[in-house]
Image: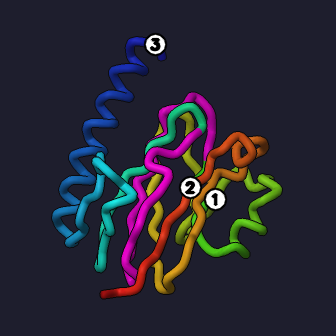
Amino acid sequence: MTAPTMTRRRLWLTAVAALAMTVVVSGVGYAVASGLEDEEATTLGPGNITVEIGIEYSHFVPDRLTVVDGTRVRFVVVNGDPIHHEFITGGAEVHLRHASGTEAEHPSIPGEVSVEPNGTAITTFTFDEPGIYEFACHLPGHYDYGMRGEIEVVPTA
């Protein structure tokens, strides 16, 4: 494929994916949290929500979220980098298992997804317990470069 053809195809796929996400989000009752003004001040949930996490220059944007316990988050991870990344969230045991960064691809497991260069991937995770959860990319060198973030899970009011 020529570069202009690949660019047109990528734009078309992005538009189709955005439309599909809008239909799916409104069709199954997900609330959408994208482009948050002040992520740290916004508590998301309870229920089903969708959060878009961008990847730019090997950093997550946003890199901090607050959700109510019992919230099921659908993460739409948009990789703006020309290299592979992953999005891993969960407890400390999950991050210990991935710390070596040796898993090139992630199967369909809640809270784990591989993201192709300039691609989009989706995973879900339910935050059942209050506390601090990390999300990270454990591919070699990425975590040390700062490719990580935090999700604070607060008790239901």
Q: Is residue 75 visible?
A: yes
Per the rendered image, the range of residues in magenta is 59-85
The secondary structure that most of the magenta stretch takes on is strand
Percent of width and height locating residue 46: 30, 79
**Residue mark closest to the camera, 3 vs 1:** 1
- Dividing the picture into quarters, in which one does residue 70 lie? bottom left
- At a point 39% along the width and 65% down the height, the residue shown is 74
Residue 71 colored magenta? Answer: yes
- At a point 46% along the width and 13% down the height, the residue shown is 3
47 with respect to 75 (left or right)? left
CB atoms of marks 3 and 1 within 8 Å: no
12 with respect to 85 (left or right)? left
Element marked by disc 1: loop
* Three-letter code, disc 3: Ala
Upstream in sequence: badge 3 or badge 1: 3
Residue carrying label 3: 3
Percent of width and height locating residue 63: 50, 51
Residue carrying label 2: 149
Nearest the viewer among 142 and 116 is: 142
Residue carrying label 1: 106
Q: CA distance from mark 1 to mark 2?
A: 19 Å
- At a point 82% along the width and 56% down the height, the residue shown is 100
Element marked by disc 3: helix
